[in-house]
Image: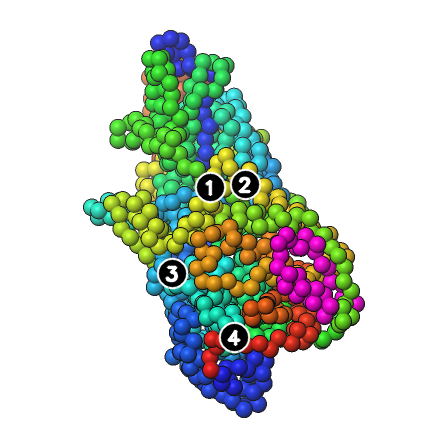
């Protein structure tokens, strides 16, 4: 538990999050228009999205499937009967004058998500619900001095709103929670998790209280699209609230915005200005009634999720929790690793993937998907180290050649003559030569056995690094009669 | 009255097939009739050039012995149906000169079957009204007049333009929509046949929405047979409307066998309201006699929640409307009245674009959905709706159909009730239950009031049993033998 130290004592932060995740689908929630990002303004707008007279919404079944899959991935109840409601308010980027959402009967009910804290302990965050809703369009206010523009490309795109219980107590919790939800959605393929493009955004509800006291009045920080900013906004907002209360003030329930440039939250609208959304069931849509068997079919298609993968990577490959965590952050990372590990030793594989490979990807601006070195090739390289064809040190040179030429590691080793010398006759010859050439060192090493390393280095140099260092070391020790 | 404009749809179809007449002749006769009856203000857009073009295409098909079930039939379309490249306004200023780039499913079905578009028909603004006096384009006049009195009467609403044009022979048939009685009440006021199908029978796609859970398209015609033919064309299952129901569309005309022996007809006692005019009561009893004479059995049934139908309707319908009409905000299409900021632009556009009745219903609807009132009004009204449905379900365990009057009075004068919304809303007292329960209903002209105006009787059917409904309506139509003609029809 981490508390804020105020002037009058300790304060506890209470956090609940609403995550808006754009469903990965080709077409919108209630129309056939495309959802592709970055298209010309108003080029992906159907008659339904523009709310032309007489147009009617039709539920995109695939989006529904995605929501059910997500609910199952969050260990949540799937409601076999759910209802679409209208949330009524006027805004130029909301052509219908209402957003189709789910209010009383959402598709997904209570669930639970585990986050792993830095000390290795786990913290449960309850999921209150997940419901489907339409995204609004985008208002653009800075193109003309006296007019605003509206882009309806996003209008009607399917969103999942995932509402957590107020179960988080620190900014770290919130960051880990968003990151965990993002990972789960990416595993499920139900949201690409791209926060920069707005595919995943969060509204953060922040309140403070004396430890264990009743909940305080909350403020909602809207539309956060970076995990780092979520952390900073929470820290700022909690401190702001503590200061107000300690100065004898009260917290006004309101919606606030995070100002990235100034590093502060500021008021957007108060409770009094809040809309009366006049929710009621959308009469254009029938209640959605699901068969349990259909839900079961989807359940059978759930891929291995991060928690399960974490455990398996540890047990199957003998990885530690830290390495396993790095790999599961992205399903592509774990898949890549598993292919590499097929080639040879798993510990070597994880070091190569999280070390050399990630370093290279970062430096050169690649992602795991666009990596110039494919998992199979890296696996082959790890295989060459594992079976002692080359040393780890030579492997680093091979890795560079692979990047340069795109050739397979075995071919590079062959062509460049980098094969490790395991022929003891050849190694013995080199060892004998080094011993014969350095009688003074021989005397010294007998006094100080640790100096054997100098002989190994000399032999490795003499063999161009290709000798098996272990074999060299063993031979030297035998010849010099040291332990 | 020209021979051509007095033809029923079924007669015209026969003559077209026999090549006794051409579709162009038929269209021209109706274009002439439209001009003669201009004073009724039934049409708010004349599409005669398009009509001639479509009629020529129909003649080409008919010449080859081809064509659909409405081939060459000139129709009017209520201005709530979006028609591609043809202005569609819902009779509201707020839509301005809105011209859709798309065709409603119902009208697309009709054009595919060969119908010819004469023009767009006036209606109450956004179909909100029972007298067609709330239209931005002005009131529609009923072609009927009281005996010895030339006062202009309302045709009923909201499909007043459709009813007036059909009655005045300014089209053979018309599309209409019915949310609380908007097909049946104007049919009753104009001596025409008005059929409101089961909710989900006709697609709502491309029809300007009033109250989504109640709106249903249907035809107004001059005979039950014509209504059957029109419905067969208009109805379809449509994946673009989630509330459309996937039930095959039967050949409704084949259901008109003339045989209703043994059919059980329910008479709901709660429809005997206080102060119902004697002539309406007498007409109802006459209807019972006709059905008995045709071999049907008459049973008293009870629909105990009937008295709550109208108040519940006037919560549910405005609530949905307040949300459905939010899209008319002056941002993307239609009327825009600029302001200093976006909120002002909304207020200015909607204040100037919507008429008084529409504004009244938006206010009521917004109120009943507001935080703190939702449970007391909207939620309770939806519960009442469930009870009304259950009443019908129970009654239909015993009977096949029900017979009631369509309206509590005959047509009234223009301006008579416009200042009194409550009296106006009472026009829907016999028709709203049918919408609340999603059932099919039909009004047929059954008699003449003491002052010479048409009166209608309503039959209410089981869900998706339009066939029994039409068969019985056909039998009653023959028994009623309604031959009176309106005074202001095309000559």
Secondary structure beneath dot 1 equals helix
Q: Where residue A164 sits in the image (x, y, percent)?
A: 50, 31
Residue B367, numbered label:
1
Mark closest to the chain's N terminus, 4 or 2: 2
* Dot in front, 4 or 1: 4
Q: CA distance from mark 4 to mark 2?
A: 43 Å
The chain that hosts pointer 1 is B
Q: Which mark is residue B136?
A: 3
Rendered residue at 54%/29% (across/down): A126
Circle number at residue B486: 4
* Residue B284 part of the magenta-drawn span: yes
Magenta residues, start to end? B262-291
Residue lying at 58% horizontally and 83% vertically, measured from the top left: B11
The residue carrying mark 2 is B377
Badge 4 element: loop
Q: Evaluate whether label 4 is on the same chain as label 2.
A: yes
Which chain is home to disc 4?
Answer: B
- Mark 2: give few (<14), some (14-19) or many (20+) Cα within 10 Å: many
Q: Residues within 10 Å of mark 4 (few under 14, many from 20)?
A: many
**Mark before the other along the chain sequence, 4 or 3:** 3
Q: Give the colour scheme of this rendering.
A: rainbow
Are dots 4 and 3 in contact, CB under 8 Å? no
Left or right of residue B337, residue B478 in this image: right
């Amino acid at each position: 538990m981490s508390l804020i130290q105020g002037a009058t004592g300790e304060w506890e932060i209470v956090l609940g999050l609403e995550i808006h995740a754009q469903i990965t689908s080709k077409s919108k929630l209630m129309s056939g228009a495309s959802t592709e990002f970055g298209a010309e303004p108003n080029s992906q707008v159907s008659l339904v999205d523009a709310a032309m007279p007489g147009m009617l919404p039709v539920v995109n079944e695939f989006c529904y499937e995605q929501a059910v899959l997500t609910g199952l991935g969050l260990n949540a109840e799937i409601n076999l009967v759910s209802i679409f409601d209208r949330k009524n308010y006027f805004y130029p980027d909301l052509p219908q004058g209402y957003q189709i959402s789910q209010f009383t009967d959402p598709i997904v009910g209570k669930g639970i998500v585990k986050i792993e804290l830095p000390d290795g302990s786990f913290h449960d965050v309850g999921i209150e619900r997940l419901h489907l809703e339409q995204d609004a369009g985008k208002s653009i206010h800075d193109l003309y001095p006296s007019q605003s523009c509206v882009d309806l490309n996003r209008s009607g795109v399917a969103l999942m709103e995932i509402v957590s219980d107020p179960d988080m107590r620190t900014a770290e919790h919130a960051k880990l929670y968003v990151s965990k939800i993002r990972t789960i959605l990416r595993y499920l393929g139900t949201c690409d998790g791209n926060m920069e493009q707005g595919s995943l955004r969060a509204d953060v509800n922040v309140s403070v209280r004396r430890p264990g006291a009743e909940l305080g009045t909350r403020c909602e920080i809207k539309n956060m699209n970076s995990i780092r900013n979520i952390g900073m906004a929470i820290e700022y907002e909690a401190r702001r609230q503590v200061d107000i209360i300690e100065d004898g003030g009260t917290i006004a329930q309101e919606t606030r915005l995070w100002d990235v440039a100034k590093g502060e939250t500021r008021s957007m609208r108060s409770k009094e200005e809040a809309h009366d959304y006049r929710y009621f069931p959308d009469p254009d849509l029938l209640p959605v009634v699901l068969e349990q068997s259909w839900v079961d079919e989807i359940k059978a298609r759930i891929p291995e999720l991060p928690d399960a993968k974490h455990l398996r990577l540890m047990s199957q490959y003998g990885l530690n929790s830290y390495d396993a965590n790095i790999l599961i952050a992205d399903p592509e990372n774990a898949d890549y690793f598993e292919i590499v590990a097929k080639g040879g030793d798993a510990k070597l594989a994880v070091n190569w993937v999280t070390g050399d490979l990630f370093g290279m990807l970062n430096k050169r601006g690649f992602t795991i998907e666009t990596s110039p070195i494919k998992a199979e090739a890296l696996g082959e390289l790890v295989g060459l180290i594992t079976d002692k064809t080359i040393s780890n040190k030579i492997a680093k040179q091979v890795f560079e050649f692979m990047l340069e030429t795109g050739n397979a590691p075995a071919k590079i080793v062959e062509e460049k003559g980098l094969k490790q010398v395991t022929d003891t006759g050849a190694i013995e010859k080199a060892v004998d030569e080094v011993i014969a050439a350095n009688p003074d060192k021989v005397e010294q090493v007998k006094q100080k056995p640790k100096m054997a390393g100098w002989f190994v280095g000399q032999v490795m140099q003499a063999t161009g690094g290709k000798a098996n260092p272990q074999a060299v070391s063993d031979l030297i020790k035998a010849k010099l009669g040291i332990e | 009255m020209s021979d051509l404009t007095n033809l029923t749809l079924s007669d015209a179809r026969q003559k077209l097939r026999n090549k006794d007449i051409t579709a162009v002749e038929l269209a021209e006769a109706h274009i002439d009739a439209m001009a003669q009856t201009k004073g009724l203000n039934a049409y708010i857009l004349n599409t005669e050039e398009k009509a001639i073009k479509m009629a020529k295409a129909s003649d080409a098909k008919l010449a080859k012995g081809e064509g659909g079930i409405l081939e060459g039939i000139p129709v009017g379309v209520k201005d709530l149906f979006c028609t591609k490249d043809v202005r569609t306004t819902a009779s509201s200023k707020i839509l301005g000169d809105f011209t859709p780039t798309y065709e409603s499913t119902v009208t697309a079905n009709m054009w595919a079957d060969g119908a010819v578009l004469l023009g767009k028909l006036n209606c109450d603004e956004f179909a909100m009204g029972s007298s067609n006096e709330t239209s931005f384009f002005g009131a529609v006049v009923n072609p009927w007049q009281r005996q010895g009195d030339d006062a202009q009467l309302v045709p009923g609403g909201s499909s007043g333009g459709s009813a007036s044009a059909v009655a005045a022979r300014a089209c053979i048939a018309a599309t209409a929509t019915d949310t609380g009685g908007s097909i049946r009440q104007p049919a009753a006021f104009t001596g025409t046949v008005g059929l409101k199908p089961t909710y989900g029978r006709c697609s709502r796609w491309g029809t300007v929405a009033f109250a989504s859970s109640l709106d249903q398209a249907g035809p107004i015609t001059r005979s039950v047979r014509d209504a059957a033919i029109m419905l067969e064309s208009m109805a379809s299952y449509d994946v673009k409307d989630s509330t459309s129901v996937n039930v095959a569309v039967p050949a409704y005309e084949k259901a008109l066998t003339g045989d209703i022996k043994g059919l059980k007809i329910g008479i709901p006692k709660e429809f005997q309201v206080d102060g119902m005019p004697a002539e309406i009561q007498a007409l109802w009893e006459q209807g019972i006699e006709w059905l008995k004479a045709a071999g049907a059995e008459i049973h008293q049934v009870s629909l105990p929640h009937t008295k709550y139908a109208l108040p519940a309707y006037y919560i549910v319908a405005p609530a949905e409307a307040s949300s459905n009409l939010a899209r008319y905000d002056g941002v993307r299409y239609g009327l825009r009245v600029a302001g200093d900021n976006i909120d002002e632009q909304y207020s200015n556009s909607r204040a100037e674009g919507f008429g008084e009745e529409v504004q009244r219903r938006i206010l009521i609807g917004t109120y009943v959905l507001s935080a703190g009132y939702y449970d007391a009004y909207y939620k309770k009204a939806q519960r009442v709706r469930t009870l009304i449905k259950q009443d019908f379900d129970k009654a239909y365990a015993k009977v096949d159909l029900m017979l009631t009057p369509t309206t509590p009075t005959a047509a009234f004068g223009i301006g008579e009730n416009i200042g009194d919304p409550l009296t106006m809303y009472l026009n829907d007292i016999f028709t709203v239950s049918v919408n609340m329960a999603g059932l099919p209903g039909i009004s047929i002209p059954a008699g003449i009031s003491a002052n010479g105006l048409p009166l209608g009787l309503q039959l209410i059917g089981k869900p998706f049993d339009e066939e029994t409904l039409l068969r019985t309506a056909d039998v009653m139509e023959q028994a009623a033998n309604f031959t009176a003609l309106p005074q202001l029809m095309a000559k």
